[in-house]
């Protein structure tokens, strides 16, 4: 019989064909989209889809909103007046846990007559273009947000300045800053409309930063006259290719390259080290399959979910190159402790922290290597604390035989989600006297949830499952 245990989670576990899958112990979810163009109903519908899915799947709430430009207007030169207060109210009507300070925008050319109101206003990379917020935004200590202005992608010289500001900021981050970076730009970097003359400076800067940083670049703008080349760039994973607009010293073209664009010139294809994705056009039907997206940043992955106004379209899970180290402090009492490490460690490290101790594995040996998910009995005369840091394994498995089996879990796990088929009479006991017995096709007793770092004994009535 095999028992599978996974990472710490907020009690959200998904059954798979192999056992249990779970989401890491820390996560942060953001809603992203572009090109509202006054389609209030679409905005509210896609936000509702994302909100409900994030709650149901990750037991989390959307903690921020990022819209990538062109809130109003349509066609060349149609830039009606309005206020960001109005758009904020549309988001807040569906995301009641948020406030005005949790919503961010980058500027599109149709936003020329939009008033800031009492909102954050528009993000920009540097002071070369005057907006409301310049540089990186700290998203609750969980991720970074960087906004690229319309004029910082359409104008080569302005793009060069903005990209330099981004590079200087990234290079100044401390080595222990493991936060992912979300970049929102109204205008994309791939060639098609001929209006993104700053693509090469930005692509060069972002790709360099992504050599050791987790970065997601989001774009919009190209919903009118969308082409196969837009579809090919709708989602490009790390290791894929982006073909930018050819490097040019041209200034901003009139009206973004004309209605629907055109005249783009392909530059040199680049293998990217970051994720490149259309955030989702609120205004239109599902050109690429989605109208908006949620980005959930976890300790060791980035989960992107794409939504139409009526359903989830796709989920993309990206393993992080710069994961946040898992840190856990274990408290040992004087005497015996049933303990199961969540991160690989050694008896030497444990003894350094606790002093004189005795440690036993189930087979009676005194191991040096301590394995995640395995239980050990640790005796210490005085007790103390031991801090573990590192990467918790995606899964651990066990082969249970008849009689007692020492084990632990790297996840907070409900007994009903163990991913096994217990036999009548099987029992699980904890050191503090908790117990659960399997009878009448159900677990009964005082023990209902297994805790990470705690040791347990599984008394198996039969070896086969």
Image (cartoon, rainbow, N blue to C red):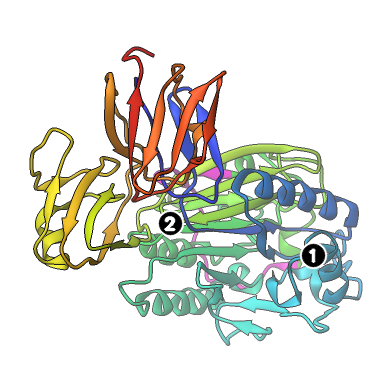
Q: Residue 299 carries which label?
A: 2
Residue 158: in magenta span? no
Q: Give the range drawn in magenta.
A: 235-254
Residue identified by numbered label 1: 96
Image quarter where the N terminus lies is top left
Of residues 132 and 139, the one drawn nearer to the viewer in this rendering: 139
Q: Can residue 307 be seen here?
A: yes
436 relative to 248, above or below: above
Q: Which residue is drawn at 78% across and 64% down?
A: 70
Instruction: Find residue 352 and report its horizontal and vertical position in percent.
Output: 11, 66
Instruction: Find residue 411 and report its horizontal and vertical position in percent.
Output: 42, 45
Q: Residue at x 81, y 76 (%)?
A: 112
Q: Which residue is drawn at 48% across and 48% down?
A: 242
448 relative to 330, above or below: above
Q: Quadrant of residue 183?
A: bottom right
Q: Can residue 266 be seen here?
A: no
SS for tag 1?
loop
Q: Quadrant of residue 104?
A: bottom right
């Amino acid at each position: 019989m095999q028992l599978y245990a996974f990472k710490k989670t907020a009690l959200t576990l998904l059954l798979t064909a192999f056992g249990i899958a779970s989401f890491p112990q820390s996560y942060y979810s953001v809603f992203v989209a572009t090109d509202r163009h006054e389609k209030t109903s679409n905005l509210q519908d896609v936000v509702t889809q994302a909100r409900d899915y994030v709650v149901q799947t990750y037991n989390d709430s959307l903690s921020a909103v990022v819209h990538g430009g062109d809130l109003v207007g349509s066609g060349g030169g149609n830039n009606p007046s309005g206020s960001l207060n109005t758009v904020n109210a549309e988001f807040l009507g569906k995301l009641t846990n948020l406030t005005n300070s949790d919503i961010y925008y980058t500027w599109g050319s149709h936003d020329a007559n939009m008033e800031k109101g009492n909102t954050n206003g528009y993000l920009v990379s540097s002071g070369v273009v005057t907006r409301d917020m310049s540089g990186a935004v700290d998203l609750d200590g969980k991720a970074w947000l960087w906004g690229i202005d319309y004029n910082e992608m359409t104008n080569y010289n302005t793009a060069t300045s903005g990209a330099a500001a981004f590079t200087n900021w990234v290079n100044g981050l401390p080595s222990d800053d493991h936060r992912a970076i979300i970049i929102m730009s109204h205008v994309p970097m791939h060639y098609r409309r001929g209006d993104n003359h700053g693509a090469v400076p930005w692509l060069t800067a972002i790709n360099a930063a992504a050599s050791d940083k987790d970065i997601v670049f989001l774009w919009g703008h190209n919903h009118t006259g969308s082409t196969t080349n837009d579809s090919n760039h709708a989602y490009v994973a790390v290791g894929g290719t982006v073909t930018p607009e050819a490097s040019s010293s041209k200034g901003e073209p009139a009206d973004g390259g004309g209605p629907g664009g055109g005249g783009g010139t392909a530059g040199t294809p680049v293998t990217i080290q970051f994720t490149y994705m259309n955030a989702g056009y609120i205004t239109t039907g599902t050109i690429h399959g989605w109208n908006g997206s949620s980005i959930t940043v976890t300790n060791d992955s980035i989960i992107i979910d794409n939504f139409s106004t009526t359903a989830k379209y796709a989920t993309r899970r990206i393993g992080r190159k710069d994961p946040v180290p898992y840190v856990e402090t274990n408290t040992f009492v004087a005497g015996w402790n049933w303990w199961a490490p969540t991160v690989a460690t050694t008896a030497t490290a444990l003894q350094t922290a606790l002093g004189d101790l005795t440690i036993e594995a189930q087979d009676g040996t005194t191991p040096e290597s301590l394995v995640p998910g395995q239980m050990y009995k640790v005796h210490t005369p005085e007790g103390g604390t031991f801090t573990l840091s590192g990467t918790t394994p995606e899964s651990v498995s066990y082969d249970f035989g008849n009689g007692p089996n020492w084990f632990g879990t790297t996840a907070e796990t409900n007994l009903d989600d163990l991913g096994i088929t217990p036999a009548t009479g099987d029992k699980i006991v904890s050191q503090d006297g908790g117990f659960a017995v399997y009878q009448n096709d159900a677990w009964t007793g005082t023990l209902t949830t297994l805790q990470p770092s705690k040791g347990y004994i599984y008394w198996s009535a039969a070896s086969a499952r």
